[in-house]
Image (cartoon, helix red, strand yellow):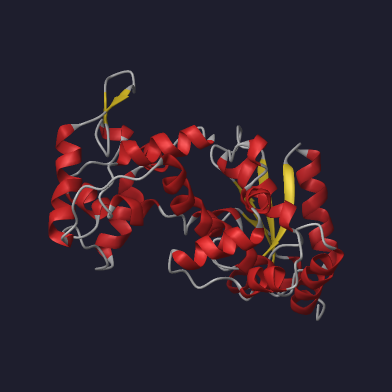
Amino acid sequence: LASNTSRLNIDEIASATQRPQDVIGCHFFSPANVMRLLENVRGSKSSPRTIATAMAFGVKIKKITCLVGNCDGFIANRVMGVSGSRDLVHSGLLPHQIDAAAEAYGMKMGPFRMNDLVGLDLFGRERASTGKATPDKDAFDAMYKAERFGQKNGKGFYKYDDKGKLSRDPEGEAIVQKVWSNLGVSPSSMTQEEIVEKLYLPVVNEGFKCLEEGMAIRPADIDVCLHFGYNWPRYRGGPMRWAAAMGLPVALEKIQKQGMTASTLLKECVDKSWTLDSPELTKRIEQAWNGRWSKL
């Protein structure tokens, strides 16, 4: 039994069956006929036979198939879910400025264009229905309240013509600026490099947390998931390789300056002068993976 869920707990699904060892996640990325990534999500009772079957299935249908652990968001959605786009738009930057920096870095689409494409009503409706929405202080909630759902109704963070071509929208930007006023924030400026670091260093930090928790087998798997699941630019190598190119000590320093709680594994790498290719790090990650799953 394979579930395509992007967030539901595989173990909870398995607990409803008489054969939890035969349950696994097969998480395709939308649109599934275009996106090449398949995350196979092992639960706490998924058997080696079930895992091998799911991996062979991925190969057979010509997907780039990664085995990952069962956690909230799995790998690609989990690490990209902590990106700094929300913080940036609430710090005095307009969506087009953030998107321009992301696209100059090599992303095919910046985070606000992406949200407009996916539909702002998806998470907006959930937040509103659960009482979590704060449209006075959150630009995403404010867009949903204003019935700006993205491309599907021609207006979101941007506006769209009949052919789907986007342009900046003074009305949309006024909603963002109203949120700034409520937060006591003034328009700000950053270099594109600073914006990219605010966007994607949280992703790096979360990637190291996935490794230390035994949710990914190797750093390269995280990079593969981000390239084939989110179109992270190939020539950047993915977030983990990007951090390595920056230098892990530099990445750690910048993460801490942003006020994040740095991954224990990242700090260990810096303290012991490990690189992503160090045999010691490979052994440490294997211990985390085996420690979580060897009881099966």
Along the horizontal axis of the image, is 146 left or right of 266? left
Which one is nearer the viewer's eye here, 11 or 163? 163
Q: Is residue 275 visible?
A: yes
Along the horizontal axis of the image, is 81 left or right of 283? left
Residue at 80% x, 81% y: name it: 295
Residue 142 location, x and y as percent? 20, 52
Residue 174 location, x and y as percent? 14, 42
- From the image, which quarter does the C terminus lie in? bottom right
Residue at 67% x, 48% y: name it: 245
Quadrant of the image occupied by residue 160: top left
Residue at 17% x, 54% y: name it: 179
Along the horizontal axis of the image, is 221 left or right of 278? left
Quadrant of the image occupied by residue 3: bottom right
Work out whether 273 lies above or below 56.
Answer: below
Residue at 42% x, 40% y: name it: 192
Which one is nearer the viewer's eye here, 136 or 122? 136
Residue 266 location, x and y as percent? 65, 68
Work out whether 102 lies above or below 283.
Answer: above
Q: Is residue 43 visible?
A: no
